[in-house]
Image: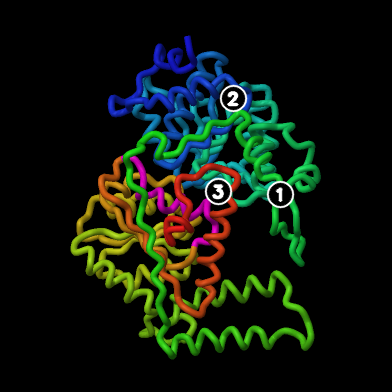
Amino acid sequence: MTPFETVLEHYDFPERINPHPLQVETINELASKPDSAELLDMGTGKTFVATACALFHKISYGNQTIVIMPPILLTQWARWLAEIQPELSVTVYRGTPAERTKLSLNSDFVLVGVQIFKKDYDRFSSHFTGKDCSVFVDEATIVGNIESDNHQKVYEFSIGRYRGLLTGTPMNSVMDVYGLLKFYAPGTYRNLKAFSNLHVDEYDFFRKPVKFKNLDMLAENMKINSKRILFEDMFPATEEPIYFPMYYDLEPAHYKLYKKLAEEELLKLPDGGKIDATSANKLLHALGQIIINWAHFSGEPDKTSSTVSMIEQQLSELGKGKLVVFAKYKLTVSHLAERLRRYGAVTINGEVSEKQKDKNLLAFMGDPECRVIIIQFVSGGKGLDGLQHVCNHCFFAEPCEQSRDFHQCVARLKRLGQRLRVFVTMGIANKTTQVRGFKNLLKNDTLVNEVIRNATQLRTAIYGG
């Protein structure tokens, strides 16, 4: 029997699940490999495929499964596993330190957010010493950066165990590919130096790689022990989203404050000195936030950015329709929530508890008076499901420069269950850092498309060539 047939002999999936041939092919191809990567596009069933592979490991080898993920996905995973019969034992490992000590690690599935996993690493490491388990990482780009604690702890824990990476956007930067390949195709490169010698062509002043080479070779290496499926492979009739960059000007007084902040910060540099990377990033982040948070930086609570007016205009055009707003900064999320309160605005960002995030998501999906949900890229731009059933319009209030994060955000609406064409509006304030941010998005997306096959090439989609 194939791995999927083996699973179906022991377990029943919900009736609503009708496995696509490409999903079945992926399960059969990857389930028996010692390491693998499910590079399945958003909305193509990564969770289902990973679960089938995990159940095959349980049946064949007696393995427990540990799924490490961004914490916002915990509830979604738990709800999904609860639908499988016969019933599986599942531990959702979260809560206060005292609450976590009472949780069992002996369940069929242990679901844990990456931050809590790192905090309780010693407990996980001690408990699973000498025990067979399969380690899956959902939204696996969280372990791409080899210098991060995420990468180091998860990699160390998973040595000698089955490792399965799940992500629909397998590349944020070329350098992160090396970190992912260490998990699912170990030995492809001897070390980081070997990888850099083969693929980095040029560095900038700060020794950051800016130009790359041998990308065809890198693309081939990424196919080792992996399976790539695009949403369009499974649903070829689905229309691509419409992308619309909307350029606008800040109010004169607002722009004057923007320039004043920039000039004051630049004047702090020593005469003749060079601005270093830290100073440059600090200035760019400050300028990026002032574009929407005029009231905060001016100290005048009544000041409202033109961005808010644009969002309100879009809501007016939508009638009673709903809108997803994406933003980069926590300050922006809070400000927009206050300014859009009369639309029943709710938020998902790093300052909202997991319980409140679930409550806010359900409000947006079920309450007709809740017409706006404001989501921070890093906190809710991935993994959230259900928005597509009530909304097909989104607005980027601030630039999302990373192609991976941008496509993840759009995929909250462009996914299975969406009946309407998705419209993506990108607000871009003229003569500000947002113009540069939008250009960086197009540049990064072009680079990604040189290495992996993506459904959307933004430059073509936006400009027609």
- Mark 1 Cα within 10 Å, few/some/many (few <14, many 20+)? some
Q: Who's the residue at 66% across and 74% down the image?
A: 280
Q: Secondary structure at mark 1?
A: loop
Cα distance, mark 3 to mark 2? 35 Å
Relative side of 146 to 237, left or right? right
Give the number of the disc on residue 394. Answer: none
Cα distance, mark 3 to mark 1? 14 Å
Q: Secondary structure at mark 2?
A: strand
Residue hosting label 1: 213
Relative side of 36 to 11, left or right? right
Q: Is residue 290 above or below residue 172?
A: below
Q: Quadrant of residue 128?
A: top right
**Residue 4 at x, y = what percent?**
45, 18
Amino acid type indicated by mark 2: Cys
Residue hosting label 3: 449
Residue hosting label 2: 133
